[in-house]
Image (cartoon, rainbow, N blue to C red):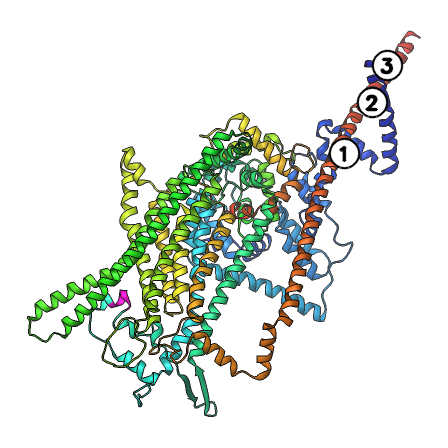
Amino acid sequence: MGQGKSQFTEEELQDYEDLTYFTKKEVLYAHQKFKALAPEKVGHNKNAKLPMAKILQYPELRVNPFRDRICKVFSSSNDGDCTFEDFLDMMSVFSDNAPKAVKAEHAFRIFDFDGDDMIGVSDLREVIERLCGPEMKLSDSEIQQLVQNVLEEADLDDDGALSFAEFEHIIDKSSDFCHSFRIRL
Amino acid sequence: MSGGKNKRSKRHEGWEEAGGEFYQELYPGGEQELFDNLQRADAAKLATLLPSKQARTTTSKRARSQNERRQSTFARTTQSRDIHLSMLPDLSENLSNEERTWEEIMQIKAMPVPMNQKREIKSRLQNATKLRLQGLEQLQWRQRKALHRFRIRFSEIVGKFELWQASLREIEGKFGTGVVAYFLFLRWLMFLNLVISIFVILFLILPTILLDKNLECDDFENSTICCSQAYLQRNLTTSNVVLDLIQGTGRMERTILFYGVYSDQIYTYFLKNLWDAEMFYNMPLAYILIPITWTLFSLVAIVKTAAKGFKERLVENEGQFYMYCNLVFGGWDFCIHNDKSAKIKHKALFNEIKGCLEEERYKEEKQSRTRESLILMYLKRVLINLLVFIILIGSGILIYKIFNIAMDKLNEQFYAENEFLNRTEPIFNLERENTYTIMRFRLTLLEFLPFITIGVLNIFIPEIFGYLIGFETYTPANAIIITLLRTVLLRLSSLAVLLSQIYLQITDPNRIEKCLDPYEEFRHECWETYVGQQLYKLVLTDFALQIVMTFFINLPRAFVARHSNSRCLKIIGTQDFYLPKHVLDIVYIQTIIWMGAFFCPFLPIIGTIFCFLVFYIKKFACLTNCTPSPIVYKASKSKSLFMSVLLLGFVISILPVAYSVAEIAPSINCGPFRRYETVWSFVVETFEAFPYLVREIVFLIGTSTFAVPAFAILLFFLYYYWAVAAANRHMVEVLKNQLVLEGHDKQFLLNRLSAFIRQHQKRCERRNRASFADDDSSIQQHSSR
């Protein structure tokens, strides 16, 4: 960790500690992990911007069906490329200490593929297709049925899409979400 | 028809115009802005302008950051970030004090904005003028800050010492959260055992080691002291150390491992430093109070953990509302980091989705099922249940028979061995040694035969159950529960048979109940120790079987599956981590530990060590032998499942112990309760010695004058909470309906509004065109002039 320490000033670390759910040590550890993705680039500039393809080499992200969405949501330039600070934000939200509400907020944005601030039918279809993976395909009618069921459960105001309030309501009642929406540093 | 439509549209226009005016009157200031917005906005995307969509507040505390949040979620709006940043609430308006500023800084981390913006907000908050706290408030705030920092440090340190963190992470990455919940449960059990062990060590084992002194046996005839003296000195024949260790006999029997050695004395000792005070330690009292304490402690721990899961389940279960949402939004374990597991997880989710849809169809089908197929299905189920019942009874009988045979043989052997040892005729020493070893070995085998039978049955019969369940068309969730129930029944029935056999042995009327001759030997002279030995052996056997199964049977299987291409071998070799089975394994051990801890105080300590080792065994089984299961295990569901099974095991293990404490006469020559008719009579006697007031109060609680009103009050509360819950449920329904209605209203209004906008835009165009036309005509006029 001696190496990592030299790259950050105490002040920066304090900032990171205040602004994320991590302690200073964890921040440094996160930086190590980030550095491992592109040792040279990050060695020169601790806050280097890595392209999305590089970020997606992080083991948990590599196999995640929503990997590109995650990168886009956390990228400060909105194109999926992440700096270390974006990466830190990401890990902070996925950490154990982040409250459910914060996780829900980001999950909503990850699942909102078309960015219209509603999880509509097309978003749901996309989520389901990604969940089942590239090899397995549900038939169209099955997806239709599933989307229908989800909307029946959660679409309280009956407008054919989930608003954030509705989504948060589901997450509130789902005890598994907090367990599953988590990446250990 | 067309006329009517025309009329209606005309009326609409009128309404819309009126609506527009009304709107303008109501919001005179924002009107221009709104219209600008409306004109720019796509009529179809009106919904995104609704306030409910704009103010996504998750907690009221974070209301301040609303604008900020909007901005970040809606990066596609044309305005730049800077403008929005400047729209942050101006802090100088209402000067906040240091504490509030600090609180706000702590809340920045919850905002979904990039780091540099967070930093900006932080510096803004820090630089804003603020009131300094004075005096006590300052002190309090400092304290709070320090506490906060301390808590972070503390949790960091605790996290570092957290047991098995790396292992858990590895398992999580490969198998997902459901399986990790199992390992967490295992760890929880280990800590439970550890706490029980600490109780036992502090209050039973240490005092015995430190304070025990041998009392002289002066009067031989009827004193319990002499009896126990005789018991302790007898049977210290030399035999194989290893055999003694695994059987708990011989020298082991006389150690503090077992009930028999604990003294019935009230220890007195002097503390020289404390004014030569004389202190007492009532060993029998401690020996009854400690089991009661850990029983209550275990119960509280289980109930507390179960209640947490139960609450979650209850919320979730509210009519199974969110099954699909849970599946879709909480389905993926974000912690999975392994390609193969990811593939399997995809498959598992696919299966689960299919299963859910199938279930829905199944339910529909059920209603439309023909009578014949229904009858056939029930017939099948009845038949299979019958078969299961027969298997259970059969295994019970098998255990019974084997136990009896083993006992008979053992008794024969026992006497044969005695004879053999007492023989005085000269034989060659070597030969004698050999025969003796073989004899001992046979004896040991016989001793362990019932337990090995139980273990083997526990391994193979669940496989049969798992095979049978396939024929009864249950839903997957029910199938797991039913298989689990049957396996629990098997394990418990085998235990019950064993216990009843032991019971028959120890309540045998022919049992010698005196200690006439110190040199005469008889079996089960201290039955509590005997029971302790049996359970000790059972735990050891079970543990040994776990090791054998994992390393010598399942490991080669997995090896075969991995390195062969033959399909047949693959079927034999592949094993998935079938959670219910593994849960039962450890709950079973725990049940025996609870059952035996009264008779063998060392069992919790052994249990702690075993849990520790079992963790590694199971980890090995999980990571090396098994492939991820194609069944989705949900963390929350499995947790409540574990706890309910554990609770069942707890109740079942405590009942026989409670019976023995209350009813069966303790042995006269060993243990802390030598003089008493039952263990409970000792408790009653001790209670009699309490002060009058305490006794009266306890008696009062026992009488009907107290019990009936208390019961009534409890009932009343129960009814009250039930009524409240019912009212709430009703309210939820009403509110839900109202929500739907409001939603419809909203949609209606939105449609109206978009129509109005379209019309407005059209009118503007028309007006423009008209003005253009005017211009044109005036130009033409000019030109013509």
Instruction: Depth check: give the residue in front, B153 or B191.
Output: B191
- Seen as rendered, the residue at the extreme right is B785
* Image quadrant where residue B92 sits: bottom right
The residue range painted magenta reads: B244-248
- Mark carried by residue B764: 2
Q: Which residue is mark 3?
A: B773
The location of residue B450, given as percent across then percent down, is 29, 58
* Local crowd size for mark 2, using a 10 Å CA cut-off: few (<14), some (14–19), many (≥20): few
Q: Which mark is first along the chain, 2 or 3?
A: 2
Tell me the SS state at disc 1. Answer: helix
Tell me the SS state at disc 3. Answer: helix
Label 2 lies in what chain? B
- Seen as rendered, the residue at the extreme front is B509
The location of residue B536, given as percent across then percent down, is 33, 64
Instruction: Identify which amino acid the numbered label 3 is placed on.
Output: Ala
Instruction: Identify which amino acid the numbered label 2 is placed on.
Output: Cys
Instruction: Identify which amino acid the numbered label 1 is placed on.
Output: Asp
User: Which of labels 1 and 2 is toward the front?
Assistant: 1
